[in-house]
Image: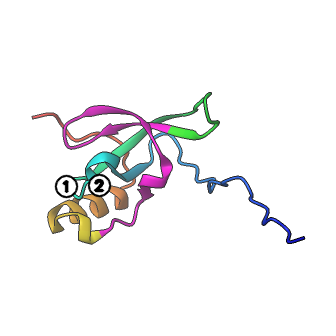
Amino acid sequence: MAQQPQTQPAVRPQIHYRMGDMVLFRDVERFWLGQPGHTFVGRVERSWTNTHNGWLLYDLTELSGNRARAGIDPDYMRLSEPDTGAMTPAAVAWLRQHLAQGTATLPAQR
């Protein structure tokens, strides 16, 4: 009798961001629908565990509009080195300068 292949539970990589980290994150729906403008710069406000599936999620402040974004999946977040193909050169330059200064404060609201 042939053996059935054993399946293993999905294992998510454990990526941890700290409060105040500057990250790039993607709006998941816009990203998978192929819509433009799906990548943003944000600051980590807190992390928490989803009680339904046990996954670690993050709450961020989206810096372009100073908006709160809750429950961001770390699979759609990156730290410090931006995907330059997903951002304008000005956004990449701003992020690199901001990170080089070591500041975690929001720019002044306009």
Left/right of residue 107 with respect to residue 44 in the rendered view: left
Is residue 46 magenta-colored? no
**Neighbourhood count class around disc 2 (C-alpha, 10 Å): few under 14, some 14–19, many 20 upward:** some
Q: Amino acid at mark 2?
A: Phe
The residue indicated by pointer 1 is 35
**Residue 79 appears at what percent x and percent y?**
44, 58
Given residues 94 and 41, the one toward you in this image is 41
- Image quarter where the C terminus lies is top left
Among the 4 quarters of the image, the one containing residue 89? bottom left
Q: What segment carries the magenta color?
A: 58-83
Given residues 29 and 87, the one toward you in this image is 29
Secondary structure of residue under mark 1: loop
Q: Which residue, as the protein is rendered here, is positioned at the far front?
A: 1
Given residues 6 and 72, the one toward you in this image is 6
Q: Amino acid at mark 1?
A: Gln
Render colour scheme: rainbow
**Neighbourhood count class around disc 1 (C-alpha, 10 Å): few under 14, some 14–19, many 20 upward:** few
Among the 4 quarters of the image, the one containing residue 83? bottom left
Left/right of residue 104 with respect to residue 73 in the rendered view: left
**Residue 2 appears at what percent x and percent y?**
85, 72
Left/right of residue 9 with respect to residue 91 in the rendered view: right
Is residue 74 magenta-colored? yes
- Image quarter where the N terminus lies is bottom right
Q: Residue at x 48, y 54 (%)?
A: 75
Secondary structure of residue under mark 2: helix
The residue indicated by pointer 2 is 31
**Residue 40 appears at what percent x and percent y?**
27, 50
Left/right of residue 109 with respect to residue 10 in the rendered view: left
Q: Which residue, as the protein is rendered here, is positioned at the far right?
A: 1
Circles 2 and 1 in contact, beta carbons < 8 Å: yes
Q: Residue at x 63, y 53 (%)?
A: 14
